[in-house]
Image (spheres, grey):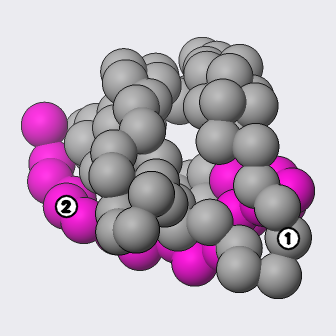
Amino acid sequence: MGRVAMTYKLNPDSEVEANIDEIVETIKTFASEVYEVQSVETKPLAFGLQFVQVHVVMEDGPGLSDKFEEMMGELVGVGEIEVLSMGLL
C-alpha cells in the first residue's frame, strides 16, 4: 500500500468559543504509526478569526482519512472540516 498526503482546513465552530492553540496542540498528539502529522498551523480567516491548517501523511487504506477527520471533528471548537488537497506519495 502507498501513502497519502492530505491538507485540511478546520474552521472554528461559531456556536462554541474555540481555543485555537489548544486545538493545534491536541492535533499534534494524533501522530501514530498510521498518521504522520507534519504541520499544524493557524492562519487568518477574516475579522480577527483564525482557522487551523493541518498537513498529515497517512497509509492509503480504507477509512483511515475518515477516522482522522472524525478525531479532529470531536475536538471542542472545531466546526467545518474541509479537505484542501489530497495526493498519493
Q: Which residue is mark 1?
A: 16
Taking 30 as reference, is 82 above or below it?
below
Give the position of the N terminus as an image quadrant: top left
The three-letter amino acid code for the residue at tag 2 is Ser
Q: Which residue is mark 2?
A: 85
Q: Is 77 in front, or is 68? A: 77
Residue 34: horizontal and vertical position, in percent? 56, 29
Q: Is residue 27 rendered magenta in the image?
A: no
Q: Examine the residues drawn in magenta and state their main secondary structure.
A: strand
The image quadrant that residue 24 belongs to is top right
Number of callouts: 2
- CA distance for labels 2 and 1: 27 Å
Residue 68: horizontal and vertical position, in percent? 62, 51
Badge 2 density bin: few <14, some 14–19, many ≥20, Cα 10 Å: few
What residue appears at the point 35 percent right and 69 percent down from the top-left corner?
A: 46
The answer to whether residue 10 shows anywhere in this view is: yes
The three-letter amino acid code for the residue at tag 1 is Val
Residue 54: horizontal and vertical position, in percent? 41, 42
Q: Is residue 75 left or right of residue 27?
A: right
Give the position of the C terminus as an image quadrant: top left
The image quadrant that residue 13 belongs to is bottom right
Taking 30 as reference, is 6 above or below it?
below
Which one is in front in this view, the residue at disc 2 or the one at disc 1?
Answer: 1
The part of the chain drawn in magenta is: 72-89
Q: Is 17 in front, or is 88? A: 17
What residue appears at the point 49 percent right and 60 percent down from the top-left corner?
A: 49
Q: Is residue 34 left or right of residue 38?
A: right
